């Protein structure tokens, strides 16, 4: 079984991609089984993974990141695209803003690596694939959508949201987006030799910026509005990469 491109759908996107149909697949790895769908989309063999599983049951700190990377490596995937619902640390990036991630801070504290028993040091000069980042912006433009470049993503462990003081600190060191998944994926995908790009969808301004409380319902509501746009960009980018 061979796939051209993999797409990891996060909140509000994974369910949309799964709804396109395809055949269920089960890929055993040394880190546990990985389940997804084989979708032939305009002649391209796509492996669709739902990051949090059906029904959004798996919290961010329990996602099998190494398993996903190993599975993609085993089936010959060269490119992996992902969506991520994020909070914005910039007041000009309001809910609905689409951003192609360019760098990250990993504050998750997770031990997330493909090299647990060997000494391998991996270069992260370009933390997210430059090729994919550029194509996300191009595909957005083709579809009449703006994808902002250069988003610096800070990965927290979750599942709780951040405190106002944490957000102020993250702003002070240059973070622009905050989420709970993308840095972990970027690390293991790079270690597996897979080019990885992430399309972030701003669902809210981060804690303390507006003074309002945050809720996952707020995130889901924005993704209901923006998820279709994100899915369209991811699928369009996959066609170009093929």
Image (cartoon, helix red, strand yellow):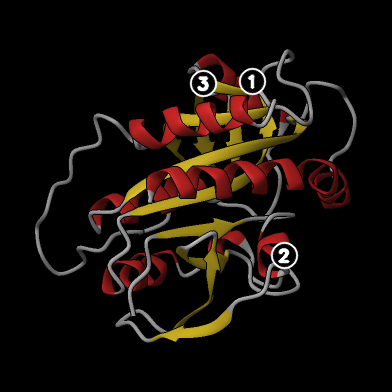
Distance, label 1 to label 2, CA atoms, is 33 Å
SS label for mark 1: helix
The residue that appears at 70% across and 55% down in the rendered structure is 11
- Mark 1 in CB contact with mark 2 (< 8 angstroms): no
State the residue lying farthest toward the left. Answer: 119
Q: What residue is at 70 percent from the left and 73 percent from the top?
A: 57
Residue 81, disc: none
Relative placement, left or right, of 30 versus 169 is left
Above or below, comparing residue 106 to residue 103 in the picture: below
Residue 13 placement (x, y as % from top left): 69, 55
The answer, for residue 217, to whether it is visible in the render is: yes
Residue at 79 percent across and 29 percent down: it is 95
User: What is the CA distance from the residue labelled 1 to the residue labelled 3?
Assistant: 22 Å
The count of marks equals: 3
Q: Residues within 10 Å of mark 1 (few under 14, many from 20)?
A: some
Relative to 40, say whether 124 is above or below.
Answer: above
User: Does 72 sit above or below residue 193?
Assistant: below
Mark 1 or mark 3: name the one nearer the start of the chain.
3
- Circle 3 packing at 10 Å, graded few (<14), some (14-19), many (20+), is some
Instruction: Return the mark for residue 149.
Output: 3
| Front residue of this view, candidates 35 and 38 | 38
Give 92 or 228, whichever is nearer the viewer: 228
- Secondary structure, mark 3, is strand
Where does the image place residue 106, in percent across and percent down from the top left?
A: 43, 40
Disc 1: which residue: 168
- Classify residue 189 by image quadrant: bottom left
Residue 15's disc is: 2
Q: Are marks 1 and 3 in contact (CB under 8 Å)?
A: no
In this view of the protein, can residue 109 be seen by the observer? no
């Amino acid at each position: 079984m061979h796939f051209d491109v993999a797409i990891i759908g996060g909140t509000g996107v994974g369910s949309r991609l799964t709804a396109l149909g395809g055949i269920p697949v089960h890929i055993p790895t040394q880190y546990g089984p990985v389940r997804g769908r084989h979708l032939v989309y305009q002649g391209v063999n796509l492996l669709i993974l739902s990051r949090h599983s059906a029904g959004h049951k798996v919290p961010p700190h329990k996602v099998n990141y190494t398993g996903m990377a190993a599975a993609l490596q085993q089936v010959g995937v060269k490119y992996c695209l992902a969506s991520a619902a994020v909070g914005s640390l910039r007041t000009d990036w309001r809910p609905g803003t689409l951003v192609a991630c360019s760098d990250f801070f990993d504050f998750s504290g997770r031990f997330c690596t493909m090299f647990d028993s060997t000494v391998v040091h991996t270069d992260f000069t370009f933390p997210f694939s430059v090729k994919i980042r550029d194509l996300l912006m191009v595909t957005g433009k083709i579809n009449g959508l703006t994808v902002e470049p250069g988003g610096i993503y800070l990965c927290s462990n979750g599942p709780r949201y951040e405190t106002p003081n944490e957000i102020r600190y993250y702003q002070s060191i240059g973070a622009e987006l905050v989420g709970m998944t993308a840095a972990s994926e970027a690390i293991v995908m790079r270690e597996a030799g897979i080019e990885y790009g992430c399309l972030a969808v701003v669902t809210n301004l981060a804690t303390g910026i507006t003074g309002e409380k945050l809720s996952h319902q707020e995130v889901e509501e924005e993704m209901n509005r923006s998820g279709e746009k994100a899915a369209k960009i991811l699928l369009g980018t996959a066609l170009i990469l093929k």
